[in-house]
Amino acid sequence: MEPKKSEAIILRTRDLGESDLIVTFFSSLYGNLKGLARGARRSSKRFVNSLNILSLVDLEFRERRSSELVWLDSCELIEGFPGIRSDYKLLSRASYMVEMTEILFPSNVPSPEMFQLLRSALGSISNRRDTEETLIMFQARAMKIGGFGINSSKCSLCGRPYKGKGRALFHPPSGSIVCLACEKESVLTPGMEPDTVHVLEQLQSSDLSLSTTLRFNQEILRELKGVLMAHIEHRLGKSLRSAKYLR
């Protein structure tokens, strides 16, 4: 097999035997893959200091006809995101982002857009730039990229267009907003002010990057947290394991 090259983010590693590693990585060109790194736990020029989890690397690998594991030939560190490793709170957020990525994009499902989102988010929290806002941005964009965007244009029950006036309710079963005439605000149907709906629309826009100057006030942040957590759990069918460490 011809070797392939791609930037990748190391998601997790597992020891195999005395010197080998099983490496799960999310690549910009080929998606989520697992590879075998022979001799990676010994001193080796091919992998030295480059296979730590949550590292951005330049990876070379070859596919194997009889196995789901690829051969990892070499790996060069691009960015280690050291700020994440020095703070448990930041590590918890990074772990949550990784788990979301793995669920939304299972093996061999490439998404360069999702790769760039995860890369930008890890860089942002490593530099301690607005970590709460970064997490909200990541959740909204990741769900949109994965095909689960929230429809905020109209009530999903009566079809009435939302014109940005008055509170809108989020309806998890439909992944859309509903109006107060169709539902009552509750824990199951959390509400949003017009400014919150507007910010959500911006977060889901295809041209938004994590370097945006968009800023949230505490009320918008609180409402978005409730809506996005309800949306993610309903669409993915479960609560993410790492979500408990965010609270």
Image (spheres, rainbow, N blue to C red):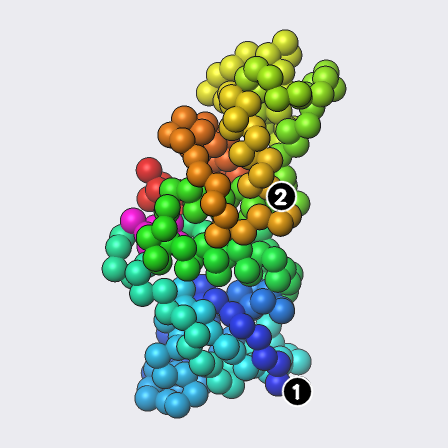
Q: Is residue 91 found inside the magenta-colored segment of the image?
A: yes
Mark 2, other Cα within 10 Å: few <14 / some 14–19 / many ≥20: some
Q: Residue at x 38, y 30 (%)?
A: 218
Tell me the SS state at disc 2: loop
Judge by depth and name the residue closer to the eye, 53 or 200. Answer: 200
Q: Main secondary structure of the magenta part?
A: helix
Mark 1, other Cα within 10 Å: few <14 / some 14–19 / many ≥20: few
Asked whether residue 128 appears in the rendered view, the answer is yes
171 lies left or right of 95: right
**Quarter of the figure with residue 82:** bottom left
Residue stretch in magenta: 89-95
Earlier sequence position, callout 2 versus callout 1? 1
> What's the mark number on residue 2?
1
Asked whether residue 146 appears in the rendered view, the answer is no
Tell me the SS state at disc 1: loop
Judge by depth and name the residue closer to the eye, 108 or 196. Answer: 196
59 lies left or right of 149: left
Q: Is residue 69 above or below residue 46?
A: above
Q: Residue at x 48, y 58 (%)?
A: 120
Quarter that holds the C terminus: top left
Q: Residue at x 48, y 85 (%)?
A: 74
Task: Write down the residue under mark 2.
Answer: 205
Q: Are marks 2 and 1 in contact (CB under 8 Å)?
A: no
